[in-house]
Amino acid sequence: MPKSLKILFVCPFAHYTGHFPWAAVHETHALAQAGAHVELLTFCGVRDNAQVKVPQTTLRQHIKLSLPLYHLANVLRKWKTTQRLAMFLETWMTLSVAIRLKESKKLDILHLRDGEPFPFLVHLFNFTRKDYRWFVSLTGTNLLQYPPLSEALKKSFGMFIYIVLLRAVNSSLWKPVYRRSLDRNRFVFSVQNELMKKRFEAFVDGALAGKVVYLPLGADIVEKEIPQQEARAFLGIPSDRTVILSFGACHVGKDLETVFKALEEIPGVVLLQGGDDSVLGAQASVAALAQKYNMTDKTVIRNYYISEEEKPYYFFAADATVLSYNKDFTSTTSLLWQTCRFKIPVIASDNGQLKELMEAFQVGLLFKAQDADSLAKTVRHFISLGPGAIETFKNNCHMFYNEFSMEKWAQRCLDIYRKLLAE
């Protein structure tokens, strides 16, 4: 890789929770370590003031006339019903600055992290431009799978607005914009599993055909292990219980109810839930489910965003992590990568890529998705396992990490860059 190669890593949502800030920190560092010159562009910085190890810049440093829109986005973000509109503005403004920086800094590639939920915006910006090189990651299937408008409205007005936006984004009316942008510039769209690759190849009547690549996630090393007793004391969990961890922000693809149904009658088990559950609403919240299934005394709930600093306590406190998803969930389960980097055994539903990876690496046990009896049987089997079997799972987690390390992710990324520049 030539030392002069310049990459602008564009992450409009690094101030949100979840994988956005993690990618802004770890993926940029991995690319820099692999030999690329990387700069990070965000809308308003990285959540928790995380330590970014590459040069970074924010939108505020580059805008003047559009300052009112910047403040409007910050206001709209405060309410869930208007948060998607805020994300639209954030994407629009961040891309406009990225385009300007490409010209002034003579950048080779613009790497857009998380090209959804508004993938057409990058093509609008390239409608009148030529010979730009774009690497766009598409991390979910929310553009491809969504409920009917009537069903969305029953859940919430915010969900209704979101589905309306998705339908607008998916409209074939955008196809001429895609075609002109793709004809005049060079794009690669990365996805995180093969099923998503096939589906995005057909996106907007095949507009992206031949430009979608499979790029697995990377897993960063855990620098410090926390003794289980210390982690449990930090979270207020008895040391003599079997702790099953459910981690991460709750969303419509996760199936927590099956977890509660399964664990209700299993003695000596504590469910540790860490992550924001506000999207579920009061009736379907973790606390409501715990009460419904008489598990209030067996559930430890931390229903807020868990910072990177606090995250290790949750995993090291657990005996196993449960990954429970609806049958039709096909997105990549990034929590599998998170769990394996901490070397914690996994109990997972048999969904698509998740099932394939569980069978390939043997990092834990599988159960039938949305089947509480199957999960209960699997948990009881896990509890009965001896130390040797648990150690085997942990060793296999280490093998998983080696296969999907950040170093390998970065090298795969650089290979894609090379091909993109050669076109």
Image (cartoon, helix red, strand yellow):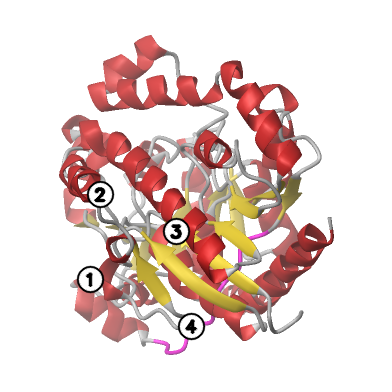
In the image: residue 423, left or right of residue 4: right
Which one is earlier in the sequence, the residue at label 3 or at label 4? Answer: 3
Instruction: Tell me the residue that label 1 is attached to.
Output: 237
Give the numbered dot on residue 402: none
Q: CA distance from mark 4 to mark 1?
A: 23 Å
Is label 2 in a helix, a strand or a loop?
A: loop
Is disc 1 surrounded by few (<14), some (14 to 19) or many (20+) residues within 10 Å?
A: many
Instruction: Tell me the residue that label 3 is attached to.
Output: 11
Q: At label 2, which amino acid type do we have?
A: Leu
Quick one: 361 or 264, which is closer to the camera?
361
Q: Quadrant of the C terminus?
A: bottom right
The residue drawn where x is 72% and y is 56% is 359
Q: Disc 2 vs disc 4: Cβ atoms closer than 8 Å? A: no
Instruction: Tell me the residue that label 4 is attached to.
Output: 222
Q: Nearer the viewer, mark 3 or mark 4?
A: 3
Quick one: 85 or 309, which is closer to the camera?
85
